Amino acid sequence: MNYLRKIAGGESKKKEESWRTKLAQASDVLEEPENHPLRSYVMSVDTLCGREIDQKLYNGWRGKPPLFENKKDPDKNFKAMCREGIPQALRSAIWFTSIVRISRPYQTREETDAFGTLAKVKALNHGWEYVLKSMFPDESDKERATIPEFGLDPQEIEAMVVQDHMMDDGKLCAKGVKGVKALTLVLYAAKENLGIEYCPLLPDLTAFLLSVMPESYAYACIREMTNSEGYYFPMSKIEHLCWCKTFGDLMKKMYPQTALAMARW
């Protein structure tokens, strides 16, 4: 009887290991050694303007998760370091994993950190290509994509796109044109695929994301933010007005001089 139990237990263990292996492969959870390249964080890239990003790390930041080892309160340490400034090289990875940590509270820290590593690049790029293919069956169809208004005045959209991102020293910038195309595709997908109709903050927020990450990551960030119970941005006119009123009241109370300067401007 003990012999049979031993065999049964061995088979059960093998099945469990096989199941875990398949799940890890399907979800891109790493089983490689600690020093495997895929465990490293993705580095930031400026898709919007094509500027070079400083890839240096400093102030105790690590190039791969976990950021902190043998710390009693990693969240407290993380907040303190963020207030001092996230290195430009890690902003894509840290911003993305911070969003995922809120939108997917059921995941372990290791699973969430994996979203910021090279192991997830292929999956995120594939997901973005699938979204593009569903909206634009033919490559030439991308030319018809336009930036949705999201409740903004069309002139504000034009000013943001042309003046803020397409011009350099008063001239049309080739890198800026390429960046605006990326901005257009992500915002168009946010409306058509995620169903966002009203969100005045989204165009500027998306441009901010694209300044440190590729299209696939910016879209994934927006998707995770819309799936979260937390309020990353208002998606109705009433919510937007409440946000603006609250922001104005807080500025007057906490920073009265800045509030006066903003009112004059």
Image (cartoon, rainbow, N blue to C red):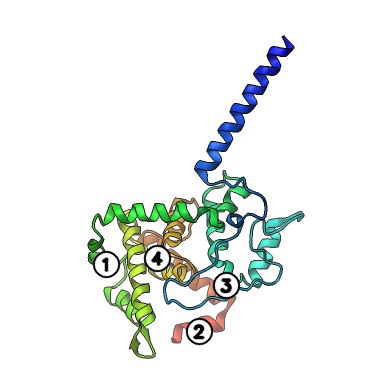
Residue 110 place in picture, x, y as percent: 62, 49
Which numbered tag is attached to residue 260? 2
Residue 141 vs 165, above or below: the answer is above
Query: In this orientation, which residue lies closer to the viewer: 4 or 96?
Result: 4
Q: How far apart are marks 2 and 4 (CA)?
A: 26 Å
Residue type at tag 3:
Gln
Residue identifier under label 4: 202
Q: How far apart are marks 4 and 3 (CA)?
A: 22 Å
Residue 195 place in picture, x, y as percent: 33, 54
Secondary structure of the residue carrying tag 4 is helix
Mark nearer the viewer, 2 or 1? 1
Residue identifier under label 1: 146
Query: In this orientation, which residue lies closer to the viewer: 131 or 99?
Result: 131
Q: How far apart are marks 2 and 3 (CA)?
A: 32 Å
Mark nearer the viewer, 2 or 3? 3
- Of the image marks 2 and 1, the number of the one nearer the N terminus: 1
Residue type at tag 4:
Leu
- Of the image marks 4 and 3, the number of the one nearer the N terminus: 3
